[in-house]
Amino acid sequence: MEEQIRANCFHLLHSSSTAASAPPQALTLSLSLILNPSTSDSTLSSLLQTLTVSLHHPHLPSLSLLPTLSLLSTLASHHPHLSRPIFHSIRSLSLTSPRALAASLSVLASLAESDQTLVPELSEFSETLFLTLCFKPSVSVRHWALMNAERLRIRPHLLVTLLLGFTRDPYPYLRAVALDGLVRLCKSIVVEDRELVETCCCRAVELFSDMEDCVRCAAVRAVAQWGQLLVALNHDSNRKNLSDALFLQVCSMVRDMSLKVRVEAFDALGEISMVSEEILLQTLSKKLLSVSLQGSKLTLQRHGLKEKTYSGLCSTKPFEIPASNSAGVFVHGLEDEFSEVRRSACHSLHTLSILSADFSGEALNLLVDVLNDDSMVVRLQALETLRCMALFDRLKVQEAHVHMFLSTLVDDGAVVRSAARKVLRIIKLEDVSIFKLCVDGLLENLEMYPQDEADVFSVLLSIGQHHGNFAADVIVGVSDEVLDVRACITLLNYRSIELC
């Protein structure tokens, strides 16, 4: 069978050696030989030689070159020992078409990724070809070049200059991909030039006002990454103010008209690891707050204040960022009409609640309302946020919160009920009345959903172990209500824990 396919394939390829391109049937037969694991090495070598000859045909059009390059790429992927000769064959091509040049560079980059010994050879010439592509009139070719800059091993200092330039390109998708390229670059290299970092951050802030949604989304991501790097490079007393300014700058985008931009803004807020407590607290109220410390107690006065401002992120173009940017940010986020935004806001609270006990306590008042959200994804994220708060001892549940939380134990979704029980496993309850309510909630869960039986009993045991004193107080009353033998045994374990 191999001999027959080989004969037909090579006959078609050789018969078209004087033509501009090989017929589709020849390419199909070539692919079958490449993919067949039983094809002999001699056949593969002959096929490589034939494809290489066709690749260097002087009159081969660009569109016909692409299938041949694809075949060579597949050949190298399935038969790695042929990667090096394929690499050198493609590298020796003299191409003028931007599309063909981009396709050949893509194959060469793939070969270098699978065979690291080829990386130095790729680096020797890819930069010149990359620059050639970047200044071609074809938008799709420039877009491809920017998307694949890292694969082509372009030097970072050259790449950052090019990317900054492309943030001013007239085509919005090129501006967006340039910003995302800056984000990837920020994550992959060590940058210690504060002026460069500030330049990247400032340019991204400027694009907050771009007309295109995709550009504003990319700008938010870029500000979050380069802004945090700018904060990290600032070692003086102004570091905290700079981080606050970054937080407030991102807050300005949470009311954007685009759903995607609002999601990106809330995701970015959750990445900022240092924020003043007064700014965090302001995000939970639409009214301006006056925050003052009396001894060790933090008090909030809800009345209008003279506007407070923070210096912007760019020292060369100074501007002031109003503290009012943060007013009611999470109120708006958790009340947004789109579940994607509400989920993102919940996730940001997940991380920010770790920074401040007072903020966590205030945020709890908003989160318990989210537990009744129409979207299961949002309810799950709210429960995950509560679990995170409990892990870091930031969850102080009051009796006013309990009933809304316990409603999730009888939710229609099994995953929601399971997530609620995970919170109960680690929660620290303040008094016996709340403990009793939680036990009652678990028993109601068991009554309505018998299939949850094993996990309910496990959680009953866990909260009993963590609250031995409370368990001893309620054991008698609860055991009278429970008929299931295993439930009684679980509750009796509370007594044994207390006695120990």
Image (tube, rainbow, N blue to C red):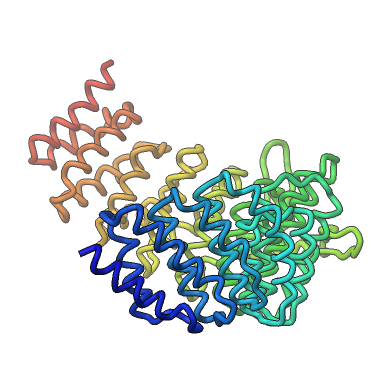
Q: Residue at x 30, y 67 (%)?
A: 6
Q: Residue at x 26, y 69 (%)?
A: 5
Residue 301 image position (x, y, % from top left): 70, 56
Is residue 254 among the parts visible in the rendering? no
User: Is residue 399 or residue 486 the one in the foreground?
Assistant: 486
In the displayed structure, 367 sits above or below 253; it is above
Residue 380 image position (x, y, % from top left): 38, 57
Q: Residue at x 33, y 72 (%)?
A: 9
- Quadrant where the N terminus is found in the figure: bottom left
User: Is residue 103 or residue 62 the one in the foreground?
Assistant: 62
In the picture, measured across the screen, residue 17 lies left or right of residue 207, that is left
User: Is residue 445 or residue 310 the one in the foreground?
Assistant: 310
Residue 276 image position (x, y, % from top left): 71, 48
Is residue 19 among the parts visible in the rendering? yes
- Quadrant where the C terminus is found in the figure: top left
Q: Residue at x 49, y 72 (%)?
A: 54
In the displayed structure, 363 sits above or below 144; it is above
Q: Residue furthest top?
A: 500
